[in-house]
Image: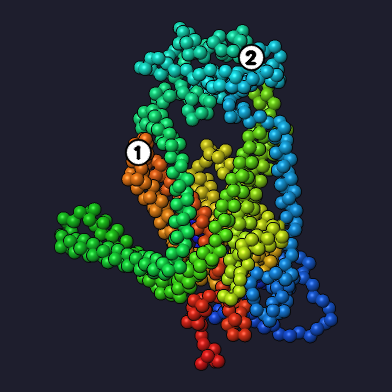
Amino acid sequence: MRGSEFQMATPLFLFACFVSLHTTTTTNCCCFHSTALLLSTSQRTGLTPYRPPVRPSQPSTGKRISPPATMGCCYCTHEDEDPEVQEVHETLKRNKNELKGPIKEGRRLRDVFFLLLFVVFCCGMAVIAWRSFHTGNPLRIIYGTDSFGNICGVDNTGLVVKNSTGNPNVGLDLRNYKFLYFLDPTALDASLAVCVSACPTLNNNDTAVESCVFDVTPCQNAGVCFSNGPYNSSVIPDGANECPDSVYSSKNYFGLRRCVPGLESLQTSTINIFNSYDLVEQVFSDLIAGYEMFGYAAIVAVVVCFLVILLMRCCVKVLVYSLIILGLGGTLALSVVTYTEWRGLKDDLNSTPKSERLDTDVRNERLLYGFMIFLWVFTGLLWLITLAVRNRIRLSVVILQQGSKAVVSMPWLYLTPILTNVFMISFIAYWLAVYAYMATSGDGRLVQGRIQYDDPTNYREMWWYHLFGLFWISQFILACQEIAIAGAVASWYFTRKDEKSESFWASVGRLIRYHLGSAAFGSLIIALVKLVRFVFEYINHKLEVNKGPIVDFLVKCFRCCLWCLEKFLRFINKNAYIEIAIYGYSFCTAARQAFKTLLENAIRVAVLNLVTSFVLFICKLFVVAGVGIIAYYWITELNTSFKEDLNYFGAVVLVCCVIAYIIADQFLNVYDMTVDTIFLCFAEDEKRNNGKDRPYYMDPSLRQFLKDNSDPTPEDK
């Protein structure tokens, strides 16, 4: 899993394991297993595969046992009573209890209700888009409007504004007046805004602002008086004059059609740092000039990512064990150095009379002593934990090697981040377009001679609906990606060497045919949590002024809890998607079965996620560093003429590194999902098969690991 998710998801998962293993009631269940199963799990020791206890036979009553009528958020039934699990058991019986990969027999459309709900919700999004497109005008945002509702740079003839009868300043042809100028840039809400043909600049370099109170000549020369432009000075809004009190030098930056005051006009701390916008403009021009290089950097990053994953098969063991040795050796060396320093300081104090000892030396000795004790305890625990989980570390290394092998064997997996980004960027562009139309769909009216826009009917409800659509649909796209990857990797795992594995597109076909409802359900859960977090931050922002230290502390705690909840649910969702890809369960059943499997392998999961996080972090650094070095060498050595055209070539190199990190994060997330899928497949393979009459499907390296770490049976002795 991803490094940021691991930081909180793994401790939360282990805490959930602890709570589950110490539960004494058997009646409270919601999506997860009963306490009897958890207690059975807690009795497992070593690495012996888990086998459910055989239930004693009971006399048949001739009656069919039906599932309980009461259900919680999922089927709150025992595994033996879950109809979906029973279907899988029946399928396995027909296959002689041998799990042969993603089950195809009996797989059907799951979570139909949530699929229909998702479709209906998308129809609602379409209705909002249709209404917004018919009533909104995003040019008001793009080009800007003056204080009378006219859009700058546009022919506004025929513009309809309430309460504007007889006002000659409404409905003007402003095609030659493309720039929006605020007469008072320090109070934009109250300032009068007009459209001008060019942003005014002052000839006097000694000052950036000239007063027009006693002499209107500077404002008339700058073209910001009503008598200069297309406006009628006979109708002026309340509180405004024909000319403003002063005129300031301004410029149109980045083609936004807004006259922004020059930094020499604003006495802020920014002036002391940059003195002008020249630095920003120069960097921006460098980025425009280097757009081709950014494309090359993206291609190089993809190639480097592929090479990194390819090298993982042979280098991951060296990398992992090198990190472990460096970590253990570093903590031990730091502990020894700390002890040496403390011993020397202690000896100096002992040789100094008490009356001559400095208070700072005494405090430093005590502080160093406490720090030394902490380091030695931490080092000892770290060494003990490493020795205790050494077999799990070895398993993690083997699974990482298998993940690299799987990704290299299925190059189509590299298409998933590209497709995901295409869908995501397209949806976000659509969402922003609808929002721009929605935000400008209100009718305008003149109040005391100035334009005010009323919110359209049901605007607030539509806005919240549209916002939730952003959360749900974006998470749905990510869920589809994870299910497709899990299905392809599971098929690869359960394929014999002499057999041909299914293609990635077969997994995509199963997703579209059977599991879009499950993706909608899982993404709905994450979207709801995101909505709660957004509402919380919105309310917190509104109450920012009245908060005290206690309230601020509680707010931070609640924010942390919501963040942890989202990470934990993402962790469960990801593993539920893997169960869906293997068995074809509905989302609730898959989440319960995944949680059960994770409970049975809690320490393995924690170690695997820790090792994976470290490895992926190092890989991302390697990709970023590699692309950065190549970009720097290409600019400074291979293309010196390009360097001479740049003002700050470091900005171009920095952007190349950012692009490399984004691409590395996207592609290594595929590898991360592959590793998680292989681990869950390994756990299911270990549980369902026995390596004898039901042969394992795992790679020989994983079989060797089981052989080295399992107790010999009587037949093996």
Seen in the picture, residue 76 relative to 544 is either above or below; the reply is below
Seen in the picture, residue 381 relative to 257 is either above or below; the reply is below
Q: Which residue is mark 2?
A: 169
Amino acid type of the residue that numbered disc 2 sits on in the rendered structure: Asn
Q: Residue at horizontal 47%, vertical 17%?
A: 200
Q: Position of residue 498 (x, y in %)?
A: 58, 76
Q: Position of residue 680 (x, y in %)?
A: 57, 69
Amino acid type of the residue that numbered disc 1 sits on in the rendered structure: Ser
Can residue 477 be seen here? The reply is yes
Q: Which residue is mark 1?
A: 641
Q: Residue at horizontal 36%, vertical 42%?
A: 639
For label 1, count other residues whose C-alpha is less than 10 Å away and answer few (under 14), some (14-19) or many (20+).
Answer: few
Residue 601 has which mark?
none
Left or right for 61, reference 175: right
Q: Which one is in front, 702 or 595?
A: 702
Helix, strand or loop at mark 1: helix
Going from N to C along the chain, the mark reached first, 1 or 2, is: 2
Seen in the picture, residue 127 relative to 19 is either above or below; the reply is above
Q: Position of residue 444 (x, y in %)?
A: 68, 24
Q: Which one is in front, 376 or 213?
A: 213
Helix, strand or loop at mark 2: loop
**Colour convention:** rainbow
